[in-house]
Amino acid sequence: MFKPFISANWKMNKNLEETVDFIKAFLPLTAGINDVDILIAPPFTSLSAAAGLLKGTNVKLGAQNVFYEEKGAFTGEISPAMLLSAGCTHVILGHSERRQYFHESDEIVNRKLKTARKNGLEVILCVGESLKEREDNKTFEVLDRQLSGSLGDGNLEGVTIAYEPIWAIGTGRTATKEQANEAHTFIRGWLKKHKEGAETVRILYGGSVTPENIASLMSEPEVNGGLVGGASLKPDSFAGIVTGARK
Ligand code: 13P
């Protein structure tokens, strides 16, 4: 059985002060919980301060993006080494918002994944279909394309997959637990068919996860955790999700 993994993705929310306030309120609510892996991914500007507060606790730190080059003339970009020195252990890659608004292709995601892994960052790789693709019965086709393009010839060490159906993100319309499990089962099968070590990869569900629905989602065999946007912005709500994920 997998240890549940609950990650916050704060997206473009919270300044430095708000980050500090969150962490100070959140840590006591989840102190001593060691049967769930907990991660928060604040904006870049809050990483260093967050790392200071999280040091020695049960909460890990991740970033929401990284560039695929190691250093150089790439104005506005952030390298894996910078994230590591800011205290990150993880990075979220391939989020649908980055694919949609910043035109990140599977090829770009793959380059980022390779550089991140080479530098020792663990990766949460996001995949998921749009509503139109689901209605057109193309969910598995999309997942197949995204997994093969984003993972490329890379191995699965240090990789977690997050299934995030776009129609469930920020909409309050959570996938049913059956829909989530069906997609996760497809992803597990894909990984087993194409890669070594698929048995140890955790597959998280993301899309309108709340303290109320996490336990039900986690009751499905292939749902190993959650990637949480809106409901991770308040300490009590995110702590409720962590608690609800305990199996
Ligand atoms: P919401 O939880 O706000 O639907 O966002 C999900 C998400 O995109 C996490 O990466």
Image: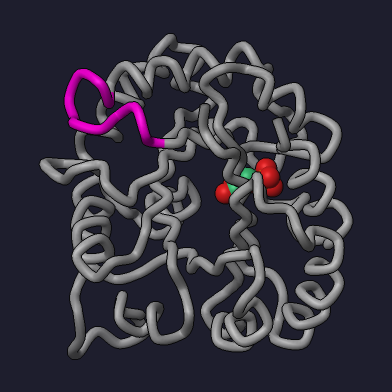
Report the number of discs: 0
Judging depth in this view, the residue of 151 and 100 nearest the camera is: 151
The residue lying at 78 percent from left, 62 percent from top is 31
Q: Quadrant of residue 156?
A: top left
* Percent coordinates x, y for residue 234 in the rendering: 83, 61
Furthest residue to the left?
A: 153
Q: Is residue 101 above or below residue 25?
A: above
The residue lying at 58 percent from left, 81 percent from top is 51
Q: Quadrant of residue 243?
A: top right
Q: Does the magenta stretch include residue 194?
A: yes
The residue lying at 46 percent from left, 73 percent from top is 88
* Percent coordinates x, y for residue 222 in the rendering: 52, 21
Q: In this view, does 30 lie above or below 5?
A: below
Judging depth in this view, the residue of 242 and 2 nearest the camera is: 2
Q: Does the magenta stretch include residue 221?
A: no
Q: Which stretch appears magenta?
A: 191-201
Q: Is residue 140 above or below residue 93?
A: above
The residue lying at 56 percent from left, 17 percent from top is 221
* Percent coordinates x, y for residue 148 in the rendering: 21, 33
Judging depth in this view, the residue of 9 and 138 nearest the camera is: 9
Q: In which quarter of the image is residue 8?
A: bottom right
Residue 26 shows in this picture: yes
Provide the major secondary structure of the magenta segment. Answer: helix
